[in-house]
Image: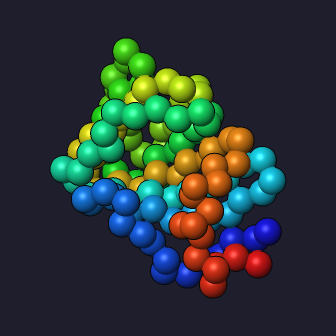
């Protein structure tokens, strides 16, 4: 599968948070989050390893018991089942990879952007 960047197909998942699945394979999935300043991803956990990269903006991440501010170019890895949350300090864009394949996020793939 290949993904193309049409700029379309984002879905609102929380107030101020939009998601779009960019591409997936049999064992992993990549998403793009657009997050507006002042929004929040609440504390949660899931059985997926999550690797992220901040492409734009600034966010405050809490992963387990540690909290740190992330700026453009920063990255992180969240182990499966570890509680985490994010406060969005500036309008931000993050790329996230989930493994194993996060099937509940396939619905966020814009069919016009995939082949």
Horizontal side, residue 87 vs residue 48: left or right: left
72 relative to 108, above or below: above
Tell me if 70 is positioned left or right of 106 in this view. Answer: left
Q: Is residue 63 above or below residue 89?
A: above
Residue furthest to the top: 65
Number of numbered discs visible in the structure rendering: 0
Residue lying furthest left: 38
Can residue 78 be seen from the camera position used here?
A: yes
Name above or below for residue 3 compared with residue 56: below
x 52%, y 44%: residue: 53
Name the residue at 59% across, 33% down.
47
Q: Position of residue 27 (x, y in %)?
A: 78, 47
Quarter of the rendering containing residue 56: bottom left
Quadrant position of the N terminus in the picture: bottom right
Inspect this view and state whether residue 61 appears. no
Q: Position of residue 95 (x, y in %)?
A: 53, 52
Instruction: From the viewer's perspective, tell me whether residue 24 is left or right of residue 9.
Output: right
Q: Is the residue 62 above or below the residue 75 in the image?
A: above
Seen at 62% across and 62% down, the residue is 106
Q: How is the image coloured?
A: rainbow
What quarter of the picture does the C terminus occupy? bottom right
Question: Is 52 or 83 nearer to us in this picture?
Answer: 83
Tell me if 115 is positioned left or right of 104 in this view.
right
Measured from the top left, where is residue 87 in percent x and y? 27, 40
Query: On the image, which quarter does residue 52 sit in?
Result: top right
Pick out the residue farthest to the bottom: 112
- Residue at 61% from the left image edge and 36% from the top image edge: 48
């Amino acid at each position: 599968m290949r993904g193309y960047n049409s700029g379309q197909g984002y879905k609102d998942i929380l107030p101020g948070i939009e998601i779009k699945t960019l591409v997936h394979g049999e064992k992993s999935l990549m998403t793009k989050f657009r997050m507006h300043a002042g929004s929040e991803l609440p504390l949660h956990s899931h059985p997926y390893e999550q690797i992220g990269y901040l492409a734009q903006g600034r966010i405050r991440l809490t992963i387990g018991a540690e909290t740190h501010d992330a700026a453009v170019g920063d990255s992180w890895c969240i182990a499966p089942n570890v509680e985490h949350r994010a406060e969005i300090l500036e309008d931000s864009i993050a790329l996230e990879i989930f493994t194993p394949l996060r099937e509940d996020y396939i619905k966020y793939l814009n069919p016009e952007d995939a082949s």
